[in-house]
Image (tube, rainbow, N blue to C red):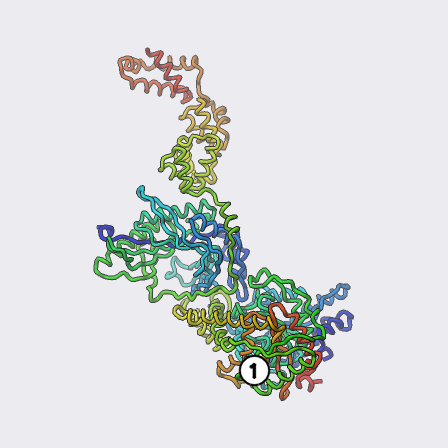
Amino acid sequence: MKTVGKSLAELHKLLVNKEISSVELTREYLDHIREYEPKIKAFITITEDEALKQAEEVDKAIAQGEEIGPLAGIPMALKDNLCTEGIVTTCASQMLRDFNPPYDATVVSRLKAAGAVLVGKLNMDEFAMGSSTENSGYFPTANPWDLSRVPGGSSGGSAASVAAGEVPYSLGSDTGGSIRQPAAFCGVVGLKPTYGAVSRYGLVAFASSLDQIGPLTRTVEDNALVLNAIAGHDPLDSTSVPFNKPDYTQFLENNVRGLKIGVPKEFFGLGLKQEVAAVIEQAIKTFEQLGAKIEECSLPHMEYALPAYYIIAPAECSSNLARYDGVSYGYRAEADGMIEMCKTTRAKAFGQEVKRRIMLGTYALSSGYYDAYYLKAQKVRTLVKQDFERVLAQYDILLSPTTPTVAYKLGEISDPVTCYMGDVYTIPVNLAGLPAISLPAGFTDGLPVGMQLIGNYFAEGLLYRAAYVFEQNTGYYKEIPGLLREAD
Amino acid sequence: MSYQDKYEMVCGVETHVELATKTKIFCGCTTEFGGEQNTHVCPVCLGLPGVLPVLNREVVNLAIKAGLALNCEIAEFTKFDRKNYYYPDLPKNYQTSQYDLPICKKGWVEIEVNGKSKKVGITRAHMEEDAGKLVHSGDSITASDSSGVDYNRTGVPLLEIVSEPDMRSVDEVIAYLQELVQILDYAGVSDCRMEQGSVRFDVNVSLRPLGSKDFGTRTEIKNLNSFTAVRRCLEYETERQAAVLDKGEKVIQETRTWDENQGVTLSLRTKEEAHDYRYFPEPDLVPLKIDRDWVERIRATLPELPAAKRERLKGLGLSAYEAGIITSNKAMAGYFDQVMQKYPEAKVVANWIMGDLSALLNAGNQSFEDCPVKPYQLADMLLMIDKGEISGKIAKTVLEEIYSSGKDPAAIVKEKGLVQIKDEGALEKIISEVLANNPKSVADYRGGKEKALGFLVGQVMKATQGKANPELVNKILKEKLK
C-alpha cells in the first residue's frame, strides 16, 4: 500500500494535487482493512458504501476547484460508542447489536462537515468498560505489534486500527484511560482532552462526569489536526465549555527549552514494571537534553484515586445503563410480563464486566451506603483535583508512564482488580478533568511503551508542543509493527 | 359515626403541576397536549443512547415565579439530581429531578375555612421532567395482553410542590388545593388544566387520637387528578384508617392508589417494598446559580394574586362571598376588572357577571376566557340602564342578544326597537287603555288594595313589551287612579 503510514498533511497534499482521488485513497484503505482484519479484528462494522459515497462527494468538490479542509476525503473510523445516523452503533454489546441511531454525535457531524470519510465502527470493551477490548460482546481485537497480545482498551479497536495502518486516525473515548492506555499498548498518539473541550453529545454514556472523546493518530501533528475539527463548544452538551479554541497545530514548534516538567513520584510506585520504568527514565533524560527542566513532585492523594473512580464511574454507569430495558429499542428477550422481560433482557444481553459495574454502582448509591461510598468518593475526587491544581501551578506539564506494564497476553488477566490496576496512572486525570496525551516513549522487547503528559485545563496546545518535540527528536512514530513490514 | 369523633386527620399534599412552557424541559419538542402518539418526541426526550439534556431556561423562570407567588425562598444555588427507578413509561429509567437543593423552599399559602384563616406551609418546590403514558390494549393494565408507551408527555416540565403536613380536615385540604391552583393559574405558571392532567396530587394522610401531638402512621395515595377525587379519596381513607385503629390494629405505612370506580383506596406497595431511588447529582447538567437580579426581574412580572385581588374587591364594596366567587376564576376576575374600567359600580358589575352572564356561559358551555360578550359591551349596557335608555328587564334580553350575535348593545336596542318609551303622551294613551280593560283592578286599588297597582304596572309593561319606563308608568298610573 502506497499511502500507509503517511501523515494527514501528506494525504491532504496528495488529494489537493490530484495525485490520488479520495475514492482511490478510500479503496486503498478498504483493501488494507480487508487484508489485515482477519488478524487484527479492529472493526465491528465496515461502511464501504457510505465511505465511497462520501469520497465521491469530496472528489466532486476537488474537481470543481473547491478548497478542501485538512481532513476532507481522508478515511477514518470511530469507536462504536459514537452515534452515527443510520449506521449501527453497538457499543460492542449484544444489547445494541441492531441499534441504528436516528442522529449523529456532534463529533460525527463535525467530521462529516469537514469531509472526513467514515470507513467503519471500531471494536471496544462493551460500553467502554474494560482495558483490553476482551470485554467486547463480539470478539477480541489483537495488538498489531504482537497478535497474541491485547491492544488495550476500552478503545482497543481505535488504537489497533491506527497502529495497523487500517485508518490514518480514529476517535476513541476515555473515561479512565480508555484512549491513552490502548494508545500506549499500540504505540500510537492518543489524547484525552480537557473535560468539556469536546462535546459528548452522541457518545453513548458510560460515566458522564468522566467521559471525553479524543483522537488516536500516528503522529502528534495528526492528532492536533483532528482535535481542531472536533473540539469546541456545543450547545447540545451542557457540560461543554465555551472557550476560545485555538488552531492546535500552531503549538507544534520544536522547542521545549525552559519548559518545567513535574514528575509525580506516586506514578512510579507499586506495580510499575522495571522495563517500562527504564523507557520512561530514558524519555525524561531526552527531555532534559532538549532543554526542559525536570523535577520530581508529589500528588499525595493519588493512591485513593483508583478506589474513588471505581465508586463514581460505576455509580454513574448504573444509572446511564438503566435505559437498556428492552422497551423501545435494542435487544428484547422473550419473557412473560414486563418485569420478567426487562430482567431477562438485561441478564442476557449485558456481559459480565458491565453487570459487575452496574451492581457496584447500584450498591454505592443505595440508601444507607451513599454517604460512605459515593459522597466519600466525591470528596476524594476534590482532593485529587486540588493535588493536580497545586502541582500544575508550579509546573507546565506533568510526565508519567501511561501504564505500569506493556500490552499483556490475551486471556492473561482474568482478575478484574488486576485489570483495574492497569489504569492507575490514567484514572486520576479523568477525576480531575485535565487533558493528557499518551505517545510512544520507546520500546521494550519489541513492544511499545507509552508516556503520559498531563497539562492544565485547556492546555492541549502545550501538551502537543511537548509531545511533538519528543516525537520529532526520537522518531519512534516511524516504527511500524512487524506485521506490516512483512507485508511490504 | 365519623372518624372525627375520635381522631384528628393530618394531611400534606404533593402537587405536580405542568409548567406553561412552549417546549419541553430538556429538548425543543412541543409541550402541546394531545397530538398523535409519539409525534412530540426527539432522541433527547426518548432517552436514546448518547443524548444529553439542555435545560430550558423558561422552566427556571416559571419555577422562580411560582416560588415567589407561594412566598418561598428562591435558592441561590440549585442543581438537578437523578431519581432512579424502573418503569416502562420512563425512557431512561431515571427521572431528572431535584433532590437536596430544590429551587424553592419555605413558603406558605393562606387559606380560609369556616371564616377562620390559616397558613399552610410549603416545604419545597422543585423542577422535574414528566414521564410518558402507558397505553393498554385492553380496558386496564390487568385486562390487556400488551401495552404501548406514548412519549409525547415525556419531558414536559413539572413543578412538584410539597406542603407541610398542616391540614387537619378534608375542607382544609380542598381549600389549600383550590387556593394553590388559583395562585398558579393567576401567576401564569401553569394552565392548570385539571381535565388534561396538568395538575396531579399525591396526598399523605394519617390519623391521631384527638388531643395527641404525635403523628400517626401515614399512607400516601398517589395520582389524584381532581378536587372531587381528593375529597372522596380522603373521606374514604380517613374512615378506613379509623376502622383499622378502632380494631386496635396499626395502619401500615404504604403507597395506595385511588380506585375511582369502586370508590376505594388499594394498597400499591408497602414501606418494605418502597423504591430506593438512589438519588445522585445529574452529571449531564451543570448546577445553577440564580442571582438576585434574576429573581427581582421575575418578581416584577408577578400579577396581582388571588388573595390581594379578593381584598381589593372587598374594598370596592363586594362581600367576601362575592369577592371569592369573582376571584375563583382568573378569567372571570380579569373580566370584572375590565368592565369596571368603564363602569365602576362593583356590586352591579358583580351581580351581572355572577348572575346572567355566568348563566349564559354555562348554558353555552363557554368560559370567561372566550366570552362572546366583550367587557366594554357589558359596561355600555349597564350605562344604558343608568341613563334610562333601557330597563333592567330589557337589559337581560339585550345581554342574550349580545351573547348570541356579538353586536353592540346600542345597535341591538335600536334594531329591535327596545328603546324605552319615555314619551308621556304615548304612555298615557296606553295606560288609559289598560285601565279601561281592567276595571276590577282599578276598583280594587281605589278600594285600598295597594297590590292592584303592581298588576296594572305589569299590564302596561306587557302592552309595551317591557319597553315602558317603569318610573313614568308608576307616576302616570298613580295620577290617573287618584
Q: Residue at x 40, y 15 (%)?
A: B430
Q: Chain of mark 1?
A: A
Question: Quadrant location of residue A342?
Answer: bottom left
Is residue A457 among what the camera can see? yes
Question: Would you place residue B14 above or below residue B365 in this image?
Answer: below
x, y percent for residue A75: 68, 72
Q: Position of residue A429 (x, y in %)?
A: 56, 73
In the foreground, B170 or B231: B170
Q: Quadrant of the C terminus of chain B?
A: top left
In percent of width and height, residue A95 lies at 50, 72
Report whether A92 appears left or right of B225.
right
Question: Which of B116 and A327 lies nearest the eye of the viewer?
Answer: B116
Q: Position of residue A351 (x, y in %)?
A: 49, 76
Type of amino acid under label 1 = Phe
**Residue position marked by numbered label 1 in the rendering:** A268
Picture layout, residue B463 above or below residue A442: above
Task: Confirm whether residue B240 shows in the render.
Answer: no
In this view, the residue in front, B231 or A89, is B231
**Labels in figure, total:** 1
Query: Which type of secondary structure does the marked residue at label 1 adopt?
Result: helix
Category of crowding for the residue at label 1, using alpha-carbon neighbours closer than 10 angstroms: few (below 14), some (14–19), many (at least 20): some
Instruction: State the residue at coordinates (44%, 36%).
Output: B336
